Amino acid sequence: MPSLLSLSLTVIALIAAYLIGSVSFAVLVSRGMGIQDPRTFGSGNPGATNVLRSGNKLAAILTLLGDAAKGWVAVTLAAWAWQQDILPESAIAFTGLAAFLGHVYPLFLNFKGGKGVATALGVLLAFQPWLALATVATWLIVAYVTRYSSLAAIIAAIFAPLYYILGGNIAWRMDQSTALVIVLISVVLLSRHKANISRLLAGKEGRIGHKK
């Protein structure tokens, strides 16, 4: 049975990870570079894709990197804490989930955040670099072939858990907590793309590089 101290430290770590995830780089970068708040145009989504609609590619890249870094930092810090016998190993995966949910439902933006693709990627990178690489490759291939960013994210979200389970049985030790977290992240990502799925089915989804 986990000790009360261990449970308390795990709860603190999850809260800290959630708060890290709640930091919106889309808003911070836009303010810092004098760009219109991404919540006021396009999809209204505070994420890298919508920041790109401002026409500022550098701002979009910085947003993407910042949002991905949140997930990576949260998991990496938890892994360090586990190595120092501060947190149980199972806490590592769930701090990644907490950071991801912080981005999707941020405390600092009244729980109205981005779709979480970049933050999910950062979490996967911290879990297993090859998993992140495979997921990014999937996104790039689908996006290149179809020119649909949303479809690429949807397909990548579906394949990410499969990559981890397959890779866990071949190349590395599969952790059940990590597998569960990746599945949960994928489910949330798919739910956040419901409107995109509807537009894709109706043939009304915007393509990459095409203005509405």
Image (cartoon, rainbow, N blue to C red):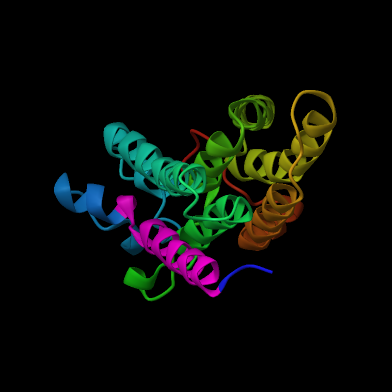
Instruction: Give the magenta-colored segment's residue range.
Output: 4-26
Q: Picture quarter containing residue 113?
A: bottom left
Q: Name the magenta segment's main secondary structure.
A: helix
**Residue 6 drawn in magenta:** yes
Q: Position of residue 191 (x, y in %)?
A: 67, 63
Q: Is residue 145 left or right of residue 61?
A: right
Q: Position of residue 188 (x, y in %)?
A: 65, 60
Task: Work out whether 142 lies above or below 119.
Answer: above
Q: Is residue 196 left or right of residue 46?
A: right
How many marks the image carries: the answer is 0
User: At 45% from the left edge and 48% from the top edge, which residue is drawn?
Assistant: 81
Q: Position of residue 39 (x, y in %)?
A: 35, 62
**Residue 76 drawn in magenta:** no
User: At 85% from the left edge and 31% from the top edge, which residue is drawn?
Assistant: 169
Regarding residue 212, the answer to whether it shows in the image is: no
Q: Picture quarter containing residue 189?
A: bottom right
Q: Position of residue 46 (x, y in %)?
A: 39, 57
Regarding residue 30, the answer to whether it shows in the image is: yes
The quadrant of the picture occupied by the N terminus is: bottom right
Task: Work out whether 148 lies above or below 103.
Answer: above
Camera-side residue of 134 and 129: 129
Camera-side residue of 110 and 12: 12
User: At 79% from the left edge and 33% from the top edge, which residue is drawn?
Assistant: 168
